Image: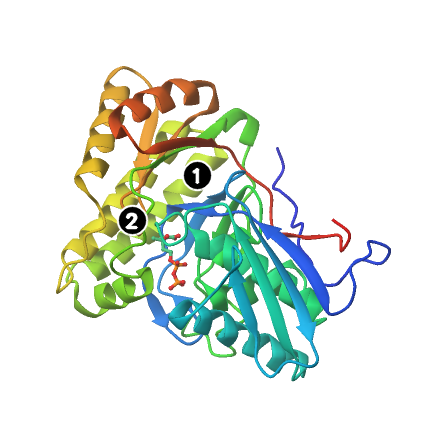
Amino acid sequence: MAAEQPTATTRPRPGTGSAAGDATAVAHPNIALVKYWGKRDEQLVLPWTDSLSMTLDVFPTTTRVRLDPGAGEDTVTLDGTPLEGEPRRRVTAFLDLVRERAGSPLRAVVDTRNTVPTGAGLASSASGFAALATAAGAAYGLGLDATGLSRLARRGSGSASRSVFGGFAIWHAGQPDRGGDPDLGSYAEPVPVPVAALDPALVVAVVDAGPKAVSSREAMRRTVATSPLYRPWAASSQADLTEMQEALRRADLDAVGEVAERNALGMHATMLAARPAVRYLSAATVTVLDAVLELRRAGVSAWATMDAGPNVKVLCRRSEADRVAGVVREAVRGGSVHIAGPGPGARLLDAAA
Ligand code: DP6
């Protein structure tokens, strides 16, 4: 299959009913197979390394942005509840950036509906900021193409740059030393993958849907600043990326899984070596990792990856996903298990939808 074409544009399409100043967008989370961990520029959200992910077809976020000419401040709600503190500040800072680019002083009403447990290391910030960038870009009339939208989403949350695209996407770190505007070089784009031959699925094991103790932002910062393992991991991650791209091209699921699992375990090793240590993996995580190992011993191609939380995503063939999900469900007991395939990029919904 050819690469998913970018489906997102922030220019309201004529005839769709998208009203200026009012736009709704939907985006899906993505799971990195080669991870993003560590920023070289906090303000611009520029990473140290390239990363590569699969956008999922589950857990969409839907966000409506409506400009409110009479309002003195932004109103931001998540699933009907007003956001406060740091989460609210991140959204309003993002809107400030959009307003600055649009040359608009207008405040907005932002209404977000999440179907993924927020803050549980299941990439809710990726779908959240991809949907917000798409909706806010349209509401404020920025007229961005998919690349511009990916750069904008990156400013909200790094991983959101990849959720702008469906299927598989690579986020370029951008060259820090080439001069010019560093913002321009750091965006995601689709990776052409023979998806039918690869037949990928991610079995998502939610072992704990509660919010995490340390935000990924803080954990990343601490890892880069204090972990003696960070630089070696970043170097090996670049090599992993090259191998990953070759494995995807060949539709070699075993090779894709092997690289993804070692890249994720290496990322967690960098955190465990940070001072003080950041440990997202729990006893339940290790139980699922053991189950994945058992599946491999039984001849099933199953590989684990974990993000900033204890939950495990198991990469396997779609044709074997039910069997994998059954084994994982036994292992998590009490947790929930979901099967995801490759999903679509961020897109605007018609105003009437
Ligand atoms: C472990 O994109 O949430 O999921 O840029 O600080 O918002 P910020 O971080 P975020 O980090 C995601 C980290 C990860 C790996 C990945 O998705 O590549």
Applied colour scheme: rainbow
Name the outermost residue toward the top.
298
Amino acid at circle 1: Glu
The residue closer to the viewer here, 26 or 111, is 111
Q: Position of residue 83 (x, y in %)?
A: 46, 66
Q: Position of residue 269 (x, y in %)?
A: 18, 50
Amino acid at circle 2: Gly
SS of the residue at dot 1? Answer: helix
Q: Residue at x 22, y 60 (%)?
A: 230
At label 2, counting other C-alpha atoms closer than 10 Å, the crowd grade (few under 14, some 14-19, many 20 or more) is many
Task: Specify the quarter for ligand 1.
Answer: bottom left
Q: Nearer the viewer, mark 1 or mark 2?
A: 2
Q: Is residue 288 visible?
A: yes
Q: Position of residue 183 (x, y in %)?
A: 51, 73
At label 1, counting other C-alpha atoms closer than 10 Å, the crowd grade (few under 14, some 14-19, many 20 or more) is some
Q: Is residue 10 visible?
A: no
Name the outermost residue toward the right.
15
In the image, is residue 30 above or below residue 75? above
Q: Quadrant of residue 195?
A: top right
In the image, is residue 45 above or below residue 285? below
- On screen, residue 14 versus residue 241, left or right, reads right
Q: Residue at x 78, y 59 (%)?
A: 18
The residue tagged 1 is 246
The residue closer to the viewer here, 41 or 87, is 87
Q: Position of residue 261 (x, y in %)?
A: 29, 38
The residue tagged 2 is 309
SS of the residue at dot 2? Answer: loop
The mark that comes first in sequence, 1 or 2, is 1
The residue closer to the viewer here, 225 or 17, is 17
In the image, is residue 133 above or below residue 272? below
- On screen, residue 195 versus residue 16, left or right, reads left
